[in-house]
Image: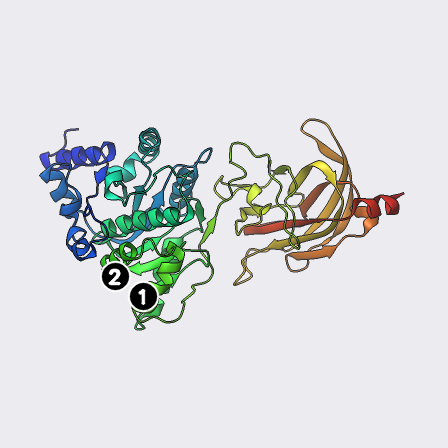
Amino acid sequence: MRCSIRQCFKTSLAIILLWFFIILKVPEEIEDVQNVPEALSGAGVWIYSLSHELASFMCHVSQAWLTVGITSVSRQGQGGLLDTLASLYHASSIAEQKRITVLVHLADSNSSWLRKTVLHISSLYSSQILAGQLLLIHAPSDAYPTVNHDQNELPQGQMYSKQNVDHAFLVSFATKLSTYFLLIEDDVFCAPNFVTHIHSKVINRKPHTWVLLEFSNMGFLGKLFHNRDLPLLARFLLLFHKERPLDWLIPHFRILLDQPNTILCRPFLFYHRLARFTLENKTLTAREKSPHGPDVLPGAVFTDMRHSGVHSPQEAYALDESFFWTYNVTTGNYWIVILNHPANLNRVQIRTGSIMDGKHILKKGQVELGYQPEGEPPNCTHFTLLGRLVQGQMDQIILKSIGYQVSCVKLTVNANQAGGLMIRHIYLWEGDALNGAADQS
């Protein structure tokens, strides 16, 4: 079917936008902040390397309700940006996706990573790119202050300096794309229907004024701004890019705009991912230890519950705010971690359901400890009942007689349950092997 001239023109421009990064131009002397507002005031200024037609097309892209802004750099062995985009689109309905524009600043000078990332994103999200719902931008190295752009060699001060400038470019470009701007990071996952939740919070805030709404209590993740404030934010970040990290500057920006108190919007909608596992390799290889907190003992996680691949079963076995999301569980369904080496456990804590409203708990379930794994993949040959969940929760000290040389911790569903189930975390504390051995003998 033949397209109209206008349709073909727009499609061609969108393809050009995909294969050639939008280049942002800022004053050579970034300290010359008097020139910053003029240099960053309009999209036509930023797009200097592309044709006038493409710049005009970008200036007339229909405005969305919300822009989701992400800055990303290369990280060895990690695909956080792709996982974040997958979570973002999986958590949004078709109707919600039409209300948002996703803006990604690829803020790394590594040309190989840039090329690979663009090719990968274009293969996965071509329809969103052609619809103008996903934009990729990149600022050239000479637009930055004189710093070493090797992410692995930057001292701390230069690291947050570059991060601040990265985000100044991001928010500057986003100014005219929408009514509201949401800042997230490139290593997160998103709660289902987060767009609708944010819209509801914004509506409920009226007629009260606000500068910043926070949908996460982690750093600068999940911060919502009015787009009208973004030019001021860009100037502020450039003014103080050498002075403080981004998560320190944003609260001060809020205070300067006369919002003295934090407005936390619960439940939180965005959570950091962990780097110690991937969806393809489901074996945990790292061991985390804190003096008083739980341990993450090396092992493998298995389940027969439904899962989408976005909120994976492994995320219940983590020390961050991630969680495992499943639905319509039945009697006998299980979640199990099989440890690489037997451990002496003295405490197990299980948390299910939402923190704020208590929904999506496991109503009837039990926890078992397993021993003497056999087979390939290994599974424990016998289990001991540790206890049953009470209102979806458990926090139990383990007797030394059953906590010695544990190889499996298993959560089992005891009754059919329709609807969603959130397993927030399964924490283990390691005990004293010698005392356990004596008690067992």
Is 12 in front, or is 327?
A: 12
59 horizontally vs 331: left or right: left
On residue 314, the disc is none
Is 146 in front, or is 314?
A: 146
344 horizontally vs 290: left or right: right
Residue located at (40% from left, 44% from top): 186
Is 63 in front, or is 97?
A: 63
Residue located at (33% from left, 46% from top): 162
Which residue is farthest top?
Answer: 376
Return the x and y of residue 320 as percentages of the image width and height. 54, 50
Residue located at (34% from left, 28% from top): 112
Return the x and y of residue 299 as percentages of the image width and height. 65, 37
The residue that label 2 is drawn on is 229
Of labels 2 and 1, earlier in sequence is 1
Dots 2 and 1: beta carbons under 8 Å?
A: yes
What's the distance in space between the residues labelled 2 and 1, CA to CA?
Answer: 8 Å
Residue type, numbered disc 2 = Asp
Residue 151 versus residue 176 in the image, above or below: above
The residue that label 1 is drawn on is 211
Residue 231 visible to the viewer: yes
Residue located at (25% from left, 41% from top): 139
Label 1 secondary element: loop
Give the crowd class for mark 1: few <14, some 14-19, many >=20 residues within 10 Å.
some
Residue type, numbered disc 1 = Val
Residue 354 occupies quadrant = bottom right
